[in-house]
Amino acid sequence: MTATPAANLFTSHAEFDPAGDFESFLKLVPAKWAIYLMADVDNRPVQLLSVKNLRYSLKRRLGGPGDEDGVGLSKRVDYRELIRHVYWRRVDSAFEADVVYLEAARDTFPQTYRGMTGFRPAWFVHVNPQTTYPRYTRTIEPTHRTGVYLGPLEDKHAAQKLVHLVESLFDLCRDYSILIESPHAGPCAWKQMGKCVGPCDGTISLEAYRELVAHSAAVLSDPHDHVREQTRRMQQAAAELRFETAEKIKTYVEQLAQLGKGPFRHVRPLKDFTWLSLQRGPRDGTAKLFLVTPGRVEEIAGLIAEPAKASDLLRLVLESATARGAAIDQPGIEVMGIVSHHLFQAKAVHGVFLPLADVDEKSIAKAFRDLQKQKAQEPTAGEGVVKELQAM
């Protein structure tokens, strides 16, 4: 008998005998949130599910004709006749469930999982100031080109909004078809309105334009320092009674202040796609710590109470982050989609995410307390199917 795909991902296993004592079988599995896989007698995967009550889910799918919650679930599949193995792994939060489910789906159904798991991608904006004609574009694949990737953004609309904002802030070219004719193109409409620096008609050289694009990418990577710098310029101009200049700088600062807030609050360079996430543990008052690095999520510790020695925990976090590589493949892109989804959800239920650059002893302790204030996962009498993937 061959091992089922993803068997090493699951922590528990039970054999199912349709002629055996079904109640005894049910006692082997918890009535808790779990990712589980049902397989046939040859350990071939049949169905992968994320459910909030594993025991009830198996009762519903494998119960006999006399069980009111059993047979009738599916007219196409008689699971009692088909299933002989059940593999599962307990999870304690929506974030953990999504990460584990994605990995299990990828290993179990590698040919079909992408179109059936329903996970959304993370969006980024990309620019390479070193190209001949640099421009900002939105993308969901931050691995294929050189240059700077900035994100994540919640969706394509937020990504395009960021592209438009940076073009407006720095008077960049909006018409790529004209840009690639520089410096021999005529002035575009934006140039004629004074809203483009004019590489198209040679008002500035392409070399100078590339330097401006590089500067804009640096500002997007760390907007807070630039806002402070421009605010000092505004205050100095006002002190020198140059009120018209101060007003122009003020308008610019107000636009610039949109960066790092609202739909752009999580934007950072791809190399800084790093968080420490605290999620609920198996019991009230406990927590699991997940390290997020580009293309990877890993559980690194568990807490049974607020950390008494946060310094030791901080050391573990930083050492673990240092050991992680930065290469990102297609599976890594999918993992970043999950992280992005949870970053943009309501904070009241989706755990705590601390940017790794901001993690210190106090922030870890505070994050643990904040997590305990969040609404706990409600137990369910039903199976609570979250995701479901079946062999074709």
Image (tube, rainbow, N blue to C red):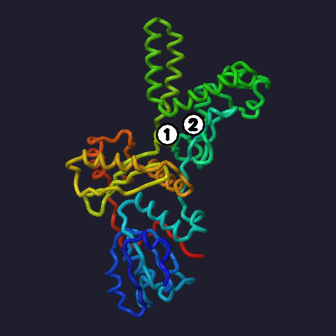
In this figure, which residue is indicated by the disc labeled 1?
267
Tag 2, which secondary structure? helix
Task: Give the number of the mark in front: 1 or 2.
Answer: 1
Q: Report x, y in % for residue 338.
A: 48, 55
In this figure, which residue is indicated by the disc labeled 2?
162
Q: Is residue 378 above or below residue 392?
A: above
Q: Report x, y in % for residue 154.
A: 52, 46
Question: In this orientation, which residue lies closer to the viewer: 379 or 125?
Answer: 125
Q: Earlier in the sequence, mark 1 or mark 2?
A: 2
The CA span between labels 1 and 2 is 10 Å
Q: Report x, y in % for residue 205.
A: 70, 21
- Residue 245 relative to residue 65: left or right: right
Kind of residue at disc 1: Val
- Residue 240 relative to residue 55: left or right: right
Question: In this orientation, which residue lies closer to the viewer: 385 or 184?
Answer: 184
Question: In this orientation, which residue lies closer to the viewer: 327 or 31?
Answer: 327
Residue at 33% in and 54% down: 289
Quarter that holds the C terminus? bottom right
Task: Check if mark 1's residue and mark 2's residue have beta carbons within 8 Å.
Answer: yes
Q: Is residue 216 above or below residue 103?
A: above
Kind of residue at disc 2: Leu
- Residue 85 relative to residue 278: left or right: right
